[in-house]
Image (tube, grey):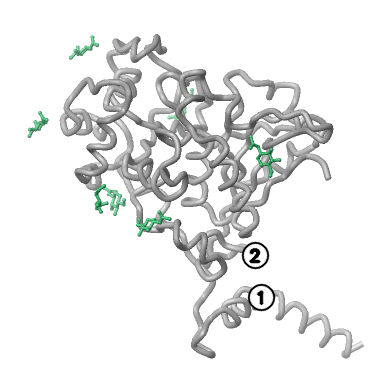
Amino acid sequence: TSLQLVFSTTILLLLYFQNSVLVFTYGSYGFVSERSPCACRICVADRGNSNWFSERYDPNVPILLNSTNSVLSTNVSRWWKLQIVPNAGNYTEVVDQLFPLFPDKEHYSDAGPDRCRTCAVVGNSGNLLGSNYGPLIDFHDFCFSLRINKGPTEGYEKDVGSKTTHRIVYPESAMDLDNSTHLVLLPVKILDIQWLISAFTTKNITQTYTKVPSTIKANKDKVMILHPEFIRYVYDNWTEGHGLYPSTGFLTLIFALHICDEVNIFGFGATSDGIWHHYFEKILTSYEIGIHAGRFENETINRLQQENKILIHKGWT
Ligand SMILES: *[C@@H]1O[C@H](CO)[C@@H](O)[C@H](O)[C@H]1NC(C)=O
Ligand SMILES: *[C@@H]1O[C@H](CO)[C@@H](O)[C@H](O)[C@H]1NC(C)=O
Ligand SMILES: *[C@@H]1O[C@H](CO)[C@@H](O)[C@H](O)[C@H]1NC(C)=O
Ligand SMILES: *[C@@H]1O[C@H](CO)[C@@H](O)[C@H](O)[C@H]1NC(C)=O
Ligand SMILES: *[C@@H]1O[C@H](CO)[C@@H](O)[C@H](O)[C@H]1NC(C)=O
Ligand SMILES: *[C@@H]1O[C@H](CO)[C@@H](O)[C@H](O)[C@H]1NC(C)=O
Ligand SMILES: *[C@@H]1O[C@H](CO)[C@@H](O)[C@H](O)[C@H]1NC(C)=O
């Protein structure tokens, strides 16, 4: 009947305008319309819905290094040089070699009201086993994998998925990647950048503070380098100075919050019978464990969920 038609049209319109309606109710200027920052139901970058988040989240921080943003502020540069491993080279000279070799462009500046980019951050917890999350994980636009080197993805696709679009690596954690995966370098020292260059050219760096692979299989056209200022920002704003610097897993999560509109976490935390696999710690080498603030990072992740910025899928209810 026509009444039904009117009714369902109203519902469709309500659904359609849901984002704008949300904004109207948050705005304090009456009917001033401000469009939602993305096309998902809830947007990470929506600063209106969490003060705690807005105080920490800086949408303008440089995320990836390129030839025009590579100069470091003295604070960042000083912090970087304080790291345990001595610097091997001159930063400016090393960075000058980067961009003839790897893509030099602004990645991920495409955020806007029409984009809904969904991302999955996938860890190693045993709670993935039997979860049947595989298809759901692979359905995301981006999948950031923290699954351990040669982790049990083969034969377990049903639970853990098979897609990896980005993997954050540093020389000591390097591994071969699929041609479709972005290698995202996490540099905590200049030697890490030198290693990246060497791995795709001379292959003559085989040692940092420990033995590292001289080269790895990865798509050169998909290489990205996290900006040192971004690492410093995660340390200042998100781990609030706990530990020496943030863990790989935590950095991956904050990276995702900056390039995605919606972030879902899988493979985090304990199994239903209480067996605790520390999702992020499991991929860390013993060198790393002592210098991160696991508990603080864990609390921050829990808070992000409370503030509706991420959704943690536990694998059980
Ligand atoms: C640099 O560090 C000093 C001291 O730690 C701080 O007072 C100053 O605000 C920092 N500057 C910037 C640009 O972050
Ligand atoms: C690094 O190299 C640049 C350019 O070659 C030079 O201007 C700068 O002084 C060097 N820095 C150090 C600390 O040697
Ligand atoms: C480098 O990144 C910055 C943002 O951090 C951007 O403004 C700039 O256009 C980028 N440069 C190139 C060459 O893509
Ligand atoms: C990997 O992808 C690049 C394009 O990004 C392509 O040129 C290259 O042939 C591919 N290599 C393999 C082994 O598939
Ligand atoms: C690697 O080779 C380059 C170019 O041949 C050279 O400049 C550099 O010093 C070498 N590095 C090491 C660690 O042997
Ligand atoms: C986060 O960073 C901004 C600048 O990037 C700074 O103004 C703010 O105080 C920081 N917040 C926290 C909680 O560190
Ligand atoms: C992390 O947070 C979860 C949820 O509150 C908690 O159950 C777990 O014990 C915490 N883990 C650590 C290592 O603190």
**120 left or right of 79?**
right
**308 left or right of 248?**
right
Q: Residue at x 59, y 45 (%)?
A: 299
Label 2: which secondary element? loop
**241 left or right of 7?**
left
The crowd level at tag 2 (other Cα within 10 Å; few <14, some 14-19, many 20+) is: few
Q: Residue at x 53, y 26 (%)?
A: 178
Q: How far apart are marks 2 and 1 (CA)?
A: 8 Å
Label 1 beta carbon less than 8 Å to ligand 7 = no
Q: Which residue is drawn at 58% across and 65% down?
A: 39
Name the foreground residue: 291 vs 268.
291
Q: Do the residues labelled 2 and 1 touch (CB within 8 Å)?
A: yes
Q: Which mark is residue 41?
A: 2
Q: Which residue is drawn at 65% across and 78% down?
A: 17
- At label 1, the amino acid type is Gln
Query: Quarter for ligand 6?
Result: bottom left
Answer with mark 2 or mark 1, whichever residue precedes in sequence.
1
- At label 2, the amino acid type is Arg
- Looking at the image, is 214 positioned above or below residue 16? above
Q: Residue 62 carries which label?
A: none
The crowd level at tag 1 (other Cα within 10 Å; few <14, some 14-19, many 20+) is: some
- Looking at the image, is 233 positioned above or below residue 308? above
Label 1: which secondary element? helix
**Residue beneath disc 1:** 18
Q: Where is residue 188 in the image (x, y as percent from the top left)?
A: 34, 30
Label 2 beta carbon less than 8 Å to ligand 7 = no
